[in-house]
């Protein structure tokens, strides 16, 4: 395999490693928010309830029941989201780790100090294909793909295959620019 091809594999794997790293951080943050709020909200409700006088008229009972139902519903909704976020975080972290490992191998080969034996290179390509099949199930959005591509092109100072420009700023993406890198 020639140097240009190796660089291309390095660029692709870095793009995906970075996409999933960012995704894991994003969903990890949301699960933390849920964890904190599931503790904080009942505490807050309790504190508010304590500051009101406990009267025995029917209106208070109705409000109390309705309020409880609302809280239970909000809690269930939050938990169902949190579990999905937790799963998404876990999967993204695993994908990022696999792509980082593969990217390191390609980088090593690119520098000329990796195992350039054709069997080893073939196994790297096979691993990348296996990962990309799994990646399909993780539903990359076009925005994520553009961001990853832009980030990796910028990192390796490579021109985008589509618009032929090296992206200057990986964090300044625009949908109406290049559909591949959004530079
Ligand atoms: Zn481009």
Image: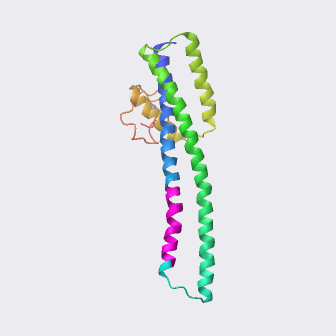
Picture coordinates of residue 15, whole percent (x, y) = 48, 32
> Where 22 falls versus 127 (above or below)?
below
Q: Is residue 39 magenta?
A: yes
- Residues 159 and 11: in front is 11
Picture coordinates of residue 174, whole percent (x, y) = 43, 42
Q: Is residue 168 left or right of residue 121?
A: left
> Where 106 falls versus 59 (above or below)?
above
Image point 60% across, 45% down: which residue?
A: 87
Please state, as top left, top right, bottom left or bottom right, where the C terminus lies in the image: top left
- Residues 151 and 55: in front is 55
Residue 165 visible to an observer of this rendering: no
Image point 56% across, 36% down: which residue?
A: 94
Indicate the quadrant of ligand 1 in the picture. top left
> Where 52 falls versus 1 (above or below)?
below
Q: Which residue lies furthest to the top in this view?
A: 117
Picture coordinates of residue 79, whole percent (x, y) = 60, 57
Residue 24 visible to an observer of this rendering: yes
Q: Residue furthest bottom?
A: 57
Image point 46% across, 42% down: which residue?
A: 176
Q: Does the magenta stretch include residue 176?
A: no
> Where 146 falls versus 48 (above or below)?
above
Q: Is the magenta stretch mostly helix, strand or loop?
A: helix
Range of the magenta residues? Answer: 33-49
């Amino acid at each position: 395999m020639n140097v240009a091809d190796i660089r291309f594999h390095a660029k692709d794997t870095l793009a995906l490693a970075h996409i999933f790293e960012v995704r894991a951080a994003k969903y990890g943050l949301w699960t933390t928010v849920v964890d904190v709020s599931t503790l904080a909200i009942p505490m807050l409700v309790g504190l508010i309830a304590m500051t009101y006088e406990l009267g025995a008229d029917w209106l208070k009972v109705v409000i109390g029941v309705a309020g409880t139902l609302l809280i239970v519903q909000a809690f269930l909704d939050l938990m169902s989201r949190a579990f999905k976020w937790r799963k998404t975080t876990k999967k993204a972290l695993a994908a990022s780790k696999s792509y980082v490992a593969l990217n390191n191998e390609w980088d090593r080969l690119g520098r000329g100090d990796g195992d350039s034996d054709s069997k080893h290179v073939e196994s790297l390509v096979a691993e990348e294909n296996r990962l990309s099949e799994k990646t399909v199930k993780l539903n990359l959005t076009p925005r994520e793909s553009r961001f990853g591509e832009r980030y990796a092109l910028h990192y390796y100072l490579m021109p985008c295959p589509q618009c032929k420009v090296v992206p200057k700023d990986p964090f300044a993406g625009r949908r109406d620019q290049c559909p591949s890198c959004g530079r």
